[in-house]
Image: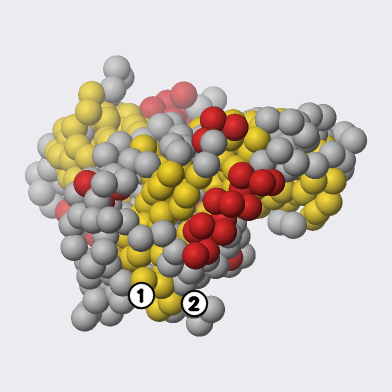
Amino acid sequence: MKKISFLSLWTSLFLSLASSVTAQFTFIPRSAPDWRYLDNGSDQGTAWTQPSFDDASWPLGTAEFGYGDGDEATVVSFGPDPFNRFVTTYFRKHFWVTNSAQWTNLIVRLLRDDGAVVYLNGTEVMRHNMPAGAINYQTLATATVNAPEEATFFEQLIPALLVNGQNTIAVEIHQVNVSSSDISFNLELVGIAAGGPIRPTFVEHPQSQTVQVGGTAIFHVTVAGTPPFGYRWRRNGITIVPFGVGTDTLIISNVQPSHAGVYNVIVTNAANPAPGVLSSNAVLTVIPVNQAPIARIQIENTVTFLDTATLITLDASADVILDGSQSSDPENNPLTFTWFVGDPPQAFATGVRVTNEVATGNHLFQLQVSDGELTGIAQAPVDVLTPCDAIALLILRIEESSHPNGIKNPLIDELETSCNHFDKGRIEQGIESLEIFQDKVADKLGDVDPAFAELLIEAAQTLIDAVSAN
């Protein structure tokens, strides 16, 4: 036979007397005694939520329950290992109702740290800071709860799934991880009867969201109770939309980094003109618009020969070393590197720094860097030349000049002599001929065309230095 305490009999009597004159009644007050709880880390499955479940062996305690905060009326256990704490702690409480049909709705006011699922007579009626889908004793809460949220009672209007006689409310509290330092639980359950104004309660709280700069953030709440309602929206605890202006929806257009913060809303009506009811917090995270990465190419061991990036080789081909390490991303996202050569471009390698063997001639290298969404492109032309290839370009410049043959021919003859030495592998003699060429240029052009003379002398010196380095 079930035992009904004196307090329960008094509650039922008071309720039957008061139901005709009040629109609300508190079935379970905050910090109520006589909660049953189980804190041994066991898997209780789903049967424990049912009214018929036998919880007589569970300890009795008074809310608030928890550990780690120092404000608990009943301290519960987290298990033997502080680095592997129990994920789930269970709570049940019975209360009695007469004339259940008069109660049209119920208000749950829940304090939870971290997440909670609430059941009334075996039916889930509220889920807070918990993932969607099936829940078991190892399911972790969605997010860490910190002050002031860990001391906040969150309201929700739920169906009045009451029966005459004994009713059962069951709650499971879940940690966000097994090393979390604290949990908290307290609950208030209020019945709403027909007639009279009903204070506002949240059916839907504002939701956290992430928005790019320039986008639109929309916070919305759904409120039950007796209208009309007043809405005062706040960011980081400061009013941004006052009563008389605010509605159930806050729209922020052209979002900027300064809009980031914690948003909530206070709702009032005739039944609760002050202080009103506070929603749960919603965090607005603002992220910058993704910008394309910047590709940059460095080609090692090249020289500037006649205004062109050039690689001098003594062979018919050369290893071109390509470096993309100076590429960057405005958001510091990780980058991938793909290298191409030719026109049209053909991919030949990936990576920040690559080597590609190419024959002598003109080559166009291209680097594509990607952050996964956008791509940056850079191109770098390079001429791979033998000494004779470079000399041929010098001869062409001289031939195209307007100077008389009496000046041009001796210069061309000396360059051809240098090329002949290089072709036969006589590197030192080829360099000596280039130095003689420089002297002849200074003698024949230094006074009549100093700018052209300087161009030819510098190009010859660049070739000398490049061949010497090989």
Q: Who's the residue at 27% across and 30% down the image? A: 340
Left or right: residue 131 versus residue 7 is left
Secondary structure state at the residue bearing disc 1? loop
As displayed, is residue 358 above or below residue 454?
above
Which image quadrant for residue 230?
top right
In this rendering, the answer to whether 10 lies above or below 205 is below
Residue 12: give x, y in percent of width and height: 55, 51
333 w.r.t. 396: above or below:
below
Identify residue for label 1.
76
Q: Amino acid at mark 1?
A: Val
Return the residue nearer the eye: 290 or 378: 290
Q: How is the image coloured?
A: secondary structure
Residue 165 drawn at (x, y percent): 43, 44
- Please give the residue where the numbered disc 2 appears in the rendered image: 72
Q: Residue furthest right?
A: 244
Looking at the image, residue 53 sits to the left or right of residue 208; the answer is: left
Q: CA distance from mark 2 to mark 1?
A: 9 Å
Q: Position of residue 209 (x, y in %)?
A: 55, 40
Q: Residue at x 33, y 41 (%)?
A: 122
> Is mark 2 in CB contact (under 8 Å) with mark 1?
yes
**Residue 210 showing in the rendered view:** no
Residue 312, picture quadrant? top left
Q: Is residue 11 above or below residue 223?
A: below
Q: Residue at x 47, y 49 (%)?
A: 96
Q: Is residue 107 visible?
A: yes
Quarter of the image containing the N terminus? bottom left
**Residue at left 67%, top 41%?**
19
